[in-house]
Image: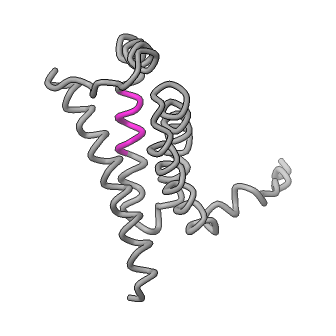
Amino acid sequence: MRATNFAWTALRLVTGLYFLATGLLITTSLVFHVGRPPAQPTLRATVFDNALHASGFMDPLLALNFIVGGGALLLARTAPFGLVMLAPTVTVIVAFNMVLAGLVPWALFVAAVWLALAWRYRSGFASLFNWTPRPAPAG
């Protein structure tokens, strides 16, 4: 395996494991009521984070998204699907960290990793952009 292939594989696996582990951690917290969400660095971030937790809707949704998307990243064949699953969440993570938390370096890092992986697996997205409908069968 060439060094560049090894680096891409390592980046994909580390990213997948990060999201999978985060999803499992959220699930464990929801099921067993252990642990607390991490403290946010600003008041605006804390208020937004508390509102999401209080809704009772976002945590299970995020956990499912992280588990499915992160798990899909663990296999090269399903990596494009994992990236598509994680795209909305990564967008919110980046915006949250840039606008509310003031963690611009972290936001740029998350965006750069996702964009690098999306570029690496761009051939897997081709069918999303060049789909042509087939005529409906007669009858």
Depicted 66 relative to depicted 47: above or below: below
Above or below: residue 6 compared with residue 118: below
Read off the magenta span: 60-67
Q: Position of residue 102 (x, y in %)?
A: 48, 31
Say which of 45 and 68 sits in front.
Answer: 45
Residue shown at 50% from the left, 30% from the top: 96
> Is 10 or 105 nearer to us in this picture?
105
* In the foreground, 70 or 114: 114
User: In the image, residue 14 lies at what x, y percent?
Assistant: 33, 60
Horizontal relation, residue 7 to residue 24: left or right: right
Please say whether residue 117 is one of the residues in the magenta stretch.
no
Residue 40's quadrant in the figure?
top left
Q: Is residue 62 left or right of residue 29?
A: right
Compared to residue 116, the image places residue 133 above or below, namely above
**Rendering coords of residue 43 (x, y %):** 41, 15
Say whether residue 65 is magenta. yes
| 120 sits left or right of 14 in the view | right
At x 40% / y 65%, what residue is drawn?
A: 11
Secondary structure that dominates the magenta span: helix
Residue farthest bottom in this picture:
2
Q: Viewer-proximal residue, 97 or 84?
A: 97
Q: Residue at x 43, y 48 (%)?
A: 69
Q: Is residue 14 left or right of residue 125?
A: left
Quadrant position of the N terminus in the picture: bottom left
Q: What is the number of callouts on the image? A: 0
Residue 64 rendering spot, x and y as whole percentages = 37, 36
Q: For residue 122, what is the image quadrant?
A: bottom right
